[in-house]
Image (cartoon, helix red, strand yellow):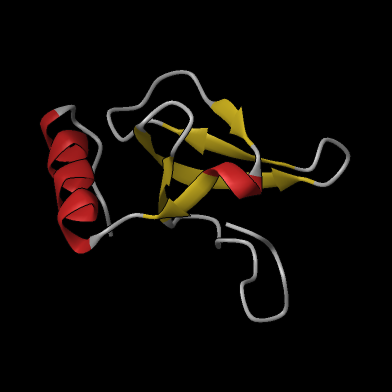
Amino acid sequence: MSISEDNPLPKAGSFVVDTRRDEIGQVMDYDPEQACLQLRPPRGGREWDARPDDVRPATDKERLSAKVQSANSGRWWA
């Protein structure tokens, strides 16, 4: 995902797929000093950093799956 005016950074709270790890994560923050997104797995756990060029938006199916994983782990969405 190349960052530009037409393709801005994903918003905090949105789901993306880290293509390097082949893993879905929820965007928690963007670290401008390291130019990376901070992602958290849907079931909770340790965050990891991903470069914006290495992520893509999650599909509807992937987002639904992430929300089910989260609900099964005890985390609830608004």
Q: Is residue 4 above or below residue 10?
A: below
Q: Name the quadrant of the N terminus.
A: bottom right
Identity of the residue furthest to the right in this view: 33
The picture places residue 41, in percent across and down from the top left corner, at 37, 30
Q: Is residue 29 left or right of residue 18?
A: right
Observer-nearest residue: 56 or 72? Answer: 56
How many marks the image carries: the answer is 0
Q: Is residue 76 left or right of residue 51?
A: left
The picture places residue 53, in percent across and down from the top left corner, at 62, 48
Q: Is residue 10 left or right of residue 30?
A: left
Q: Is residue 25 above or below residue 6?
A: above
Residue at the spot 65% in from the left edge and 40% down from the top edge: 51
Residue at the spot 27% in from the left edge and 28% down from the top edge: 43
The picture places residue 75, in percent across and down from the top left corner, at 25, 36
Q: Name the quadrant of the C terminus.
A: bottom left
Residue at the spot 48% in from the left edge and 30% down from the top edge: 20
The picture places residue 16, in percent across and down from the top left corner, at 42, 50
Residue at the spot 63% in from the left edge and 62% down from the top edge: 9
Identity of the residue furthest to the top in this view: 46
The image quarter in which residue 65 lies: top left
Q: Is residue 42 left or right of residue 54?
A: left
The image quarter in which residue 24 lies: top left
